[in-house]
Amino acid sequence: MINTFFHKVKIALSDSEIRARILFLIGVLALFRFLAIIPIPGVDKNALAAFFADNQFLGLLNIFSGGGLSQLSVVMLGVGPYITASIVMQLATIVFPQVKQAYFEEGEAGRAKFIEWSRILSVPIAVLQAIGFLVLLENQGVIGDLGTLAFVANVLLVTAGSIFLMWLGELVTEFGIGNGVSLIILAGILASVPASVSQSLFAATAANIPAYLAFGFLGLAMTYAVVVVSDAERSIPIAYARAVRGAALAQGAATYLPIRLLQAGVIPIIFALSLLLVPQMALSMLSALNVSFASSAALWYTAFLSNPWQYGAVYFAFVVLFTYFYTAVTFEPSRVADNLQKTGAFVPGVRPGRETKEYINNVVNRITLPGACFLGLLAVAPSIIQGLTGVTTLVLGGTALLIAVQVILDLAQKIDAQVSLREY
């Protein structure tokens, strides 16, 4: 196995096209990290550090911004608006038949149209998120009192940074290797690791060394679990009816239908984070408008987010609910059953049509429960650790771990596919 690995690495580095794709990816990620350290005007760095230290929720949002939010950089929104727009477009397939037809039935042309709509929708979402964050940070004293002109300039700057990252991600997907948007998020996660480890080592004392060792073992166990669960699937056997071709009777083929345990990926976590973020941003904007109840409500909601047990319980429930919801949106047993019937395929022992649909639906519902609970536990792992130990300097980010492992596995598969083409 080791010899095979080094053989593939040798092919990847010796092939000019693969090498060019890898270098292009490295160059784009280096540009992103450079932009992530350029702050917007008017930031109080001491107030910013204190604000992030007291708000674990914003720490989770920082994951999806690629690390730019913690610096209030020009790319502080990261690719979040584009991800949100893609989710909104997928939800629109339920409401609007035209969107559903474009996504599911028009092939590559429909997918290109779907992506174009997502890009357009990203712009107003980025503007709204920029306004919400800047109002929140201005109220918290992280940003100085901006005038109207400076505020508008910051909104335009942050929005442009997010759209620029979206464009870079698409360039990586086309001219590099892997999914560009996911790799930008991964770069932000990996960039924050050295600072987190050094901060934890400086904060370590003899009393909490056992807790840090436990965190290390737990981190290894969670990494192993994520690798296993990411590839886990339930295989439904599929058989094809025998076909008469001329005077010969062709034997029916047999295959299987894979149902992944993590059918929804990390999308339910993004849903849950977005839903938890909306009240905080809305209350901050209402407080800026001097609405009477908004200030007290904002204080209450901030205290709720700071309580690891209350916040963790609600977060876990949202992740489980959204896992079922998103799986129902993206995986339609009726469509799968119809496609099987049209191609002459069937599940052995199950009648085609309605019974096949019910069988597949039952399998999906059963396998979604452990996947949803696994996602929920990963999401609330930092809250559980903080609540049990009281240690906040080292937070085991299950969400970041899940994203990192899945993106690295996907990147390895894409590189392996490129190498396999050269081998044959």
Image (cartoon, grey):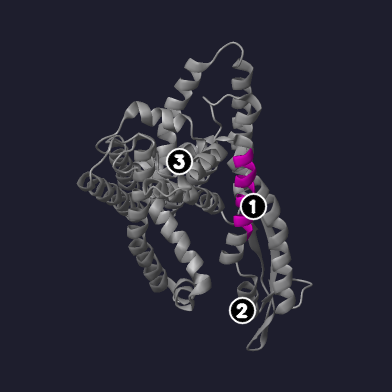
Label 1's element?
Answer: helix
Q: Which region shows up in magenta?
A: 310-324
Query: In percent of the image, x 48 and y 69: which residue is there?
Result: 92
Label 3's element?
Answer: helix
User: Can residue 130 be found in the magenta stretch?
Assistant: no
Which three-letter amino acid code belongs to the residue tagged 3? Ile
Query: In percent of the image, x 57 and y 40: which residue is there?
Result: 304
Residue 33 figure quarter: top left
Query: In the rendering, at what x and y percent does residue 390 appear?
Result: 60, 25
**Does the CB distance between marks 3 and 1 fall below 8 Å?**
no
Mark 2 or mark 3: name the one nearer the start of the chain.
3
Judge from the rendering whether residue 388 lies leftward or rightward of residue 93; answer left or right. right
Badge 2: how crowded within 10 Å, few (<14), some, or many (20+)?
few
Label 2's element?
Answer: loop
Judge from the rendering whether residue 365 lies leftward or rightward of residue 176; answer left or right. right
Q: Nearer the viewer, residue 10 or 273?
A: 273
The N terminus lies in quadrant: top right
Q: Which residue is mark 3?
A: 63
**Does the CB distance between marks 1 and 2 fall below 8 Å?**
no
Mark 1 or mark 2: name the one nearer the start of the chain.
1
Can residue 295 be seen here? The reply is: yes
Seen as rendered, the residue at the extreme left is 149
User: Can residue 320 be found in the magenta stretch?
Assistant: yes
Number of on-image labels: 3
- Provide the major secondary structure of the magenta segment: helix
Which three-letter amino acid code belongs to the residue tagged 1? Val
Q: Which residue is mark 1?
A: 320
Query: In the rendering, at what x and y percent does residue 222 appear?
Result: 62, 36
Can residue 347 be seen here? The reply is: no
Which three-letter amino acid code belongs to the residue tagged 2? Thr
Q: Which residue is mark 2?
A: 343
